[in-house]
Image (tube, rainbow, N blue to C red):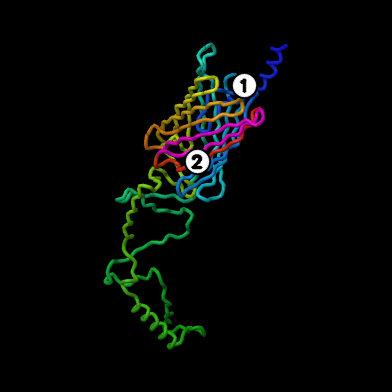
Amino acid sequence: MKAFTASLLAAPLLLTTAHAHHGQEFFLLYDARVQLPGHGTLQGGFSFIDEGTDDSFALSPSLSLGILPRTTFNLRADFTDEAGDSWAYRSIEPGFQFDLTPPDLKLPIRFGLAVSYQFSGSDGGSSHSSGTTDLSGGTVAYVHDDTASQTTQTSSTSSAAAGHDHSTHNHATAPVSQPGVDPGPDALTPEELAAIEAENAANAASQTPAAVAPSSPAPAKPKPKPSAEAHDHASHDHAGESGHSHSGSIHNHDDNLFTARLIFEADFTPDTLLVGNLISVLPEGGSAAWGYAIGVRHRFRPDLAVGVEALGDFDSQGHQEVLGAVFWEPVPHVLLKVGVGTGLTSVSPDATLRAGVLWMF
């Protein structure tokens, strides 16, 4: 009887603990657990990213569903409001996660693989830009609007001897009457013709070399180098008004790309979990980027855990972020999580705030 009563009391604890491992409990990395067929999670994520003057918000709903033994289907979408612009769809990312742990392995370690493809919603619109690098290392951009119906062209000489430029103003032209042809009742009188000629002569005399446009655009003024305290986005690409493009980094939200994560997980203790991810990102038409994610989560009680996570490129000067998080399960099958982080390099966010709610079914 005592054993039966103890089993009943322990059942909610075991159920809560089992549901807490779903493969995506962390913010920045995946753990190796996958859903059983027919079970899954629905998650709503929110993030605020402070990148100096280019703050952004993001909403990231996602679905994780067990479809086969040791196989989970994942689907994630991203919507952003960057630099004060209106909310816009950014990307959708379907993928799969596989449990690679040998079934007869007796050690407290697990292995997994997650693969996905990101379909980016970013586009360049009808405008495109090109640029040249000035002496300071900055890029001087020239924007061409493909939808423009007119093109302004600057042409003239650099001295007064080049003559008068008529490209920016028009003069009235006096009609010329042919001999023997009746000009009609609307023809100008000799006095009116003389007045027009006088006005044209006065306008021509008023033009000065200062009114003549330069023969070529003035050289671009070198951009000042940022101060040591300033946030450096030199390695970021800016795509119009859509915000940052982190091409060449695993932290890339703006390109169509393939992502693979090799997952390692180990139990230090029954309540302490260590997880690591080896990450490879391959954008369309670009070179592969490599990085890592690592995290530790400790459970103080069945419904409360804390964790520390880090994610970054293998390039020490690339994107590097560290985050602390709290996970709380107020009722069975519902998990609330919040995390606060910061960047470790000049091209990383100054600060991040992430939150999420997850329903396990």
Residue span colored magenta: 319-344
- Give the numbered dot on residue 211: none
* Residue type highlighted by circle 1: Leu
Few, some or many residues within 10 Å of mark 1 (<14, 14–19, 20+) = some
Q: Position of residue 336 (x, y in %)?
A: 61, 34
Q: Residue at x 47, y 48 (%)?
A: 54
CB within 8 Å, label 2 to label 1: no
Q: Position of residue 320 (x, y in %)?
A: 42, 36
- Residue highlighted by disc 1: 36
Q: Residue at x 47, y 57 (%)?
A: 148
Q: Earlier in the sequence, mark 2 or mark 1?
A: 1
Mark 2 secondary-structure assignment: strand
Q: Is residue 294 above or below residue 56?
A: above
Residue 117 shown left or right of residue 66 in the figure: left
Residue at far front of view: 2
Residue at far bottom of view: 191
Judge by depth and name the residue closer to the eye, 142 or 203: 142
Mark 1 secondary-structure assignment: loop
Quadrant in the picture for the C terminus: top right
- Residue highlighted by disc 2: 352
Q: Residue at x 50, y 14 (%)?
A: 107
Q: Position of residue 33 (x, y in %)?
A: 56, 22
Please say whether residue 337 is one of the residues in the magenta stretch: yes
Please say whether residue 322 is one of the residues in the magenta stretch: yes
User: Is most of the magenta stretch helix, strand or loop?
Assistant: strand
